[in-house]
Image (cartoon, rainbow, N blue to C red):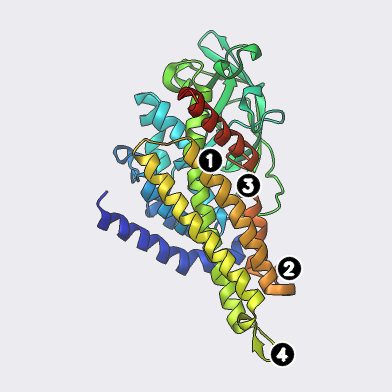
Amino acid sequence: MEPSEFSAILDAVRTFIDREVVPAEDEIEETDAIPERIRAAAADMGLFGYALPEEFGGLGLSMTEEVQLAMTLGRTAPSFRSMFGTNNGIAGQVLVNFGTDEQKEAYLPGLAAGELVASFALTEPDAGSDPSGIRTKAVRVDGGYRISGQKRFITNAPEADVFMVFARTGEVADGTKGISVFAVDADRAGVTVGPPDRKMGQRGAHTAEVFLDDVEVGPEALIGGVEGEGFGAAMRSLAKSRLHIAALSVGMAERLIEESVDHAVTQTQGGTPIADFQLVQAMLADSRTEAYAGRAMVMEAARSYDDGSDRWMAPSCAKLFCTEMVGRVADRAVQVHGGLGYMRDTKVERFYRDARLYRLYEGTSEIQKVIIAKQLIRAARREGR
């Protein structure tokens, strides 16, 4: 995409967020839903397919472009981005990277247009950070496969039209090698979605359990037409999504800093703006410095992702730092607001709750540390050190 074209898209999204989404944040919080007017506008802007190939109706953004968009999306309620996040991210990328031509034609145009919603059904009650423990089974039968199992915390499950279901086609002893992934339409017999989970934050973004009871699918549902590629598909999608989450965290941190500065210059104690107090200034300075570092890290990680030099460790480094960073910034924002920051009608209180999830999904902070360390150790051994 030409720089001027992308700049125009970024400006349009920023304007839309500031004029339409930010004013609707309280409505989203109260109703636990994205207003239809906002959803329709997002679809018209191409946001349901910003990371999907242009040939299927998407915008085909590079990673460097995507993280800039994500930092802009991160400025407002996370549920706005989550509405179309799985189409572009963990679910859509399974199709983009591993789907057959027929599977791409069947789903990607609808995902890019916002006519379909895809969900990434990997996590289970006993298999979260370690997907090798999944128990959902896909057994070969005449005409295809029969899938049975239970998935948990599946983003956009209540709205999903299709699930990327990870299931074991091999034995448990096969570990990650026995995992495959299937495109399972939500209206298939045997597919049941539980009630939306009651979460700490991120209202308007819905997760739920998904139950698969002897769901029969044809061989065309097997992504890529090859068994055993599910784990690789999951890891590749998650690595890209981790960098996206890091960028969202930077955007939220920058919004929190704006809210904190605005409050500090208008709130007075003893007739003096609290912005004149050095301990308040220190909190603002620490937050701005960390957000600046996060932005620089995300942009560099995106560059290395695009040129192929690092698509594993850099995303984990960025996610680890930025998601932990936004938690610290949110905490300082509440502190700057004082007692007001603890009140439910204050924006920083909502972002404080929203931010906590970033350290958990797409791999917890602890998992990112394991990934980073393993990459370092593997490189050292490869070099004979």
At x 62%, y 27%, the residue is: 131
> Who comes first in sequence, dot 2 or dot 1?
1
**Disc 4 residue type?**
Gly
Front label number (4 vs 3) = 4
Q: How far apart are the alpha carbons under marks 3 and 2?
A: 21 Å
Q: Which residue is mark 1?
A: 316
Front label number (2 vs 1) = 1
Going by the picture, which residue comes out furthest to the bottom? 271
Task: Bin the neighbour count of mark 1 within 10 Å (Cα to Cα): few under 14, some 14-19, many 20 and up.
Answer: many
Q: Which residue is mark 2?
A: 342
> Please, what secondary structure does the residue beneath circle 3 have?
helix
Report which quarter residue 128 is drawn in: top right
Is the residue under label 3 in contact with that under label 4 (CB below 8 Å)?
A: no
Task: Bin the neighbour count of mark 2 within 10 Å (Cα to Cα): few under 14, some 14-19, many 20 and up.
Answer: some
Q: Which residue is mark 4?
A: 270
- Nearest to the observer: residue 44 or residue 151: 151
Q: How far apart are the alpha carbons under marks 4 and 3?
A: 38 Å
> Please, what secondary structure does the residue beneath circle 2 have?
helix
Per the rendering, the mark at residue 359 is: 3
Q: How far apart are the alpha carbons under marks 2 and 1?
A: 31 Å
> Who comes first in sequence, dot 4 or dot 3?
4
- Residue 40, compared with residue 180, is above or below; it is below
> Please, what secondary structure does the residue beneath circle 4 have?
loop
Report which quarter residue 333 is drawn in: bottom right
> Please, what secondary structure does the residue beneath circle 1 have?
helix
Per the rendering, the mark at residue 326 is: none
- Residue 75, compared with residue 361, is above or below; it is below
**Disc 3 residue type?**
Arg
Find residue 28 and report its horizontal and vertical position in percent: 60, 60
> Who comes first in sequence, dot 3 or dot 1?
1
Front label number (2 vs 4) = 4
**Disc 1 residue type?**
Ser
